[in-house]
Amino acid sequence: MEGAAICLAPVKPLLHRKTAPEGIYRIKFSKFVIVQPWVDGLEIVSPLATGAVRLKDQRLFSILLQLVAACDEATIRGCLPDDLQSHYADVISLLLSSGVAGVCDGRGVADIDQDAVEAGWTFEDLAFHCHTREKMIDLCRNQARQTPIDKKQFPAKHQRIIRGSTALPLPSSVNHNLSFFQVVRERKTIRAYQEQPINAGLLSDFLWHSMHIREEISCDPGLSRAYAGLLKPVASAGALHSIELYLCINRCIGLQPGFYHFDSSDHSLGKLCDLIDPCLQMLELAAASTCRAPQAASVSPSQGQLPDVLVVMAARYGRNASLHQQTGLSYALILKDVGSIYQQLYLVATALGLAPCGLSFGSSELFHQASGHPGLLECSVGEFMIGNPPSNAWL
């Protein structure tokens, strides 16, 4: 065969050549390996690897199945076509040098996986962590695969079709005699509610002090990456603020039950639908998730209360990708924004005397059914419950 049959492409610094150990040994793929198409063959990569192995000769594909389990030198040599038999040591060296495969210990664990296995890392978490925390990000990596995103398609303020708009009351002069440090000290999760629901005035204050748009600004003016940004009470990477708030209102004095979008510019709620079945399922899922919390002594292990309002955070991924697609950090930055919003909602709810509770999971499918948004143009990335707390909740 003409040309390279297998090659090694560095993906991290400090790529060192390794050779097979002396004596009897077995090697196998890292448990974190993934195999993906690459131009004219297959690419083998791992979050822990310093290099990517690229198989260009289809006759080598059979070696993939062998390396799933620990195999010896003879097995690897037997997978090579006749014209590559004499290069078996080079193939083994390439696999070990890249870090996609390692020498097994007595338990069958590859040496390159030892620390990650002992720490309990899953592939999904390790891949996400390693990619988003690299020391340097190569802006040219995978450049051939990328499709430019038009930033004009993802403006700072996004309009959507709604059934009707309800203006929220102007924010009141809140005076609960709580200093900032008292709010921080008293912040806690409350999962129980009283019979009397919250009212539209409190909900208005909650949304205003959490997410209203203070100002639209121009970011990086004069540069090719210039874009429109927003300033809000909560932080956002690059002032992108790609996360929209949707409210599944179960009960609120002054507002009809239903699924709403919060317009943080006009400070209004746009109704998307009534409290249809997907909305009820989202509320029930939220209530059920609170029963899993071991610290929720006030909540029955088998029955949680439906919140007055379920806040769903949905990300306009394209807005982040228009700026960060080349680095692959778009989703990581979205999740950082979610964390900032969680804390902001907690602090504002505490200052207003509401019962706040951030949730660890939710359903993107139910969100799509309720909102009617197609595909992944907007995807739910976080959920937060609020309600009117019991009278003794802050004691």
Image (cartoon, rainbow, N blue to C red):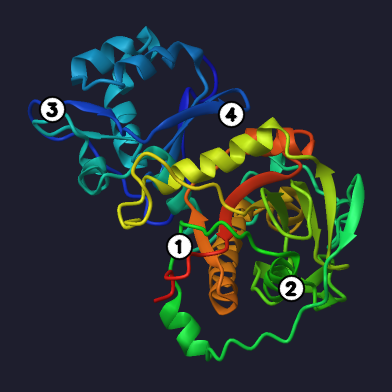
Which residue is denoted by mark 4 in the rendering?
38
Residue at 36% over, 8% down? 82
The numbered disc on residue 25 is 3
Which residue is denoted by mark 2 in the rendering?
208
Query: Separation of disc 1 and disc 3 at Cα?
Result: 56 Å
Q: Which circle's residue, 1 or 2, is located before the other in the chain? A: 1
Q: Would you say the residues marked 3 and 2 are in contact, meaning their CB atoms lie under 8 Å apart? A: no
Query: Is label 3 or label 2 in front?
Result: 2
Which residue is denoted by mark 1 in the rendering?
190
The numbered disc on residue 53 is none
SS of the residue under disc 3:
loop
Residue at 65% over, 63% down? 198
Query: Separation of disc 1 and disc 2 at Cα?
Result: 21 Å
Query: Separation of disc 1 and disc 4 at Cα?
Result: 50 Å
Image spot of residue 72 (x, y percent): 18, 20
Q: Nearer the viewer, residue 285 or 395?
A: 395
Query: Separation of disc 4 and disc 3 at Cα?
Result: 30 Å
SS of the residue under disc 1:
loop
